[in-house]
Image (cartoon, rainbow, N blue to C red):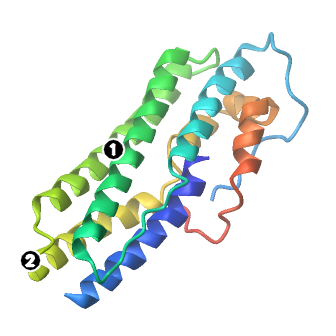
Amino acid sequence: MIRRRVVPALASVAIAIGSLSACGSDSGSGSGGSAGPASDPAVAWMDKVCGSLAAGGKQLSEIPSVDPTDPSKAKAGLVTFLTNLSTALGSVSTSIKDAGVPPVADGQATVDKAQATIDGARTSLDSAKTRLEAVSATDPVAFTNALQEISPSLSAFSNTEGPLKDLKANPELNEAFGKTPACKQVDSGTGSDSSAPTS
């Protein structure tokens, strides 16, 4: 799941931000049953979405290397990471749109809430990236101030479980999650984040 890669990555970024400044869960709640029949529309829908979540997680496997002794490289690494994260979330949003309205009760309301979560997260990330891009890494005071400004938004983002939480709040989709091969792969293939903060 994207969050399982994002949380440790953002934790790494937060630590790096702290170092630079000084110098200048969701464990998956599906039923765990066997894969549902291909004819189950909810399972088929969830399978498409989880496939995108898995792909998005792979995009985030490269945690940025942030060297507090080299502000220019640190800035570039952070900007690249924020860009990749926003892109990954955009891909998830597109996959949800492409999958259409889930064939469950309150399906439209469920995806609307998930999309709102994604939009809010991307707005926060893009704002942080823009702020970071605008500041000169050669100006220690300005750079430190920019890092301190974006740090709260990154910390807030790391405390959210993302759109999957919104989708699984729907009982039918939560049940489908436990029966979907792609969702099982997402849930088990990215490791546990039980030590990470949850919303």
Above or below — where is 82 with respect to 116? Answer: below
User: Is residue 199 at all visible to an observer of this figure?
Assistant: no
Residue 193: name its quadrant. bottom right
Above or below — where is 6 with respect to 95? Answer: below
Instruction: Report the mark closest to the observer, 1 or 2.
Output: 2
Within 10 Å of disc 1 (Cα), the crowding (few <14, some 14-19, many 20+) is many
Name the amino acid type tagged 1: Arg
Q: Find residue 41 and report its horizontal and vertical position in percent.
A: 72, 13
Residue 115: name its quadrant. top left
Q: Find residue 86 and report its horizontal and vertical position in percent.
A: 37, 44
> In the rendered view, does 145 fall on the left or right side of 152?
left
Residue visible at 81% across and 14% down in the picture? 38
Q: According to the image, label 1 marks what residue?
A: 122
Residue visible at 52% across and 62% down in the picture? 7
- 140 or 50, which is in the foreground? 140
Q: According to the image, label 2 marks what residue?
A: 139
**Which residue extends farthest top?**
39
Within 10 Å of disc 2 (Cα), the crowding (few <14, some 14-19, many 20+) is few
User: Is residue 195 at all visible to an observer of this figure?
Assistant: yes
Q: Find residue 136 and report its horizontal and vertical position in percent.
A: 10, 68
> In the rendered view, does 60 fall on the left or right side of 24?
right
- 7 or 115, which is in the foreground? 7
Residue 170: name its quadrant. top right
Above or below — where is 130 with respect to 38? Answer: below
Q: Earlier in the sequence, mark 1 or mark 2?
A: 1
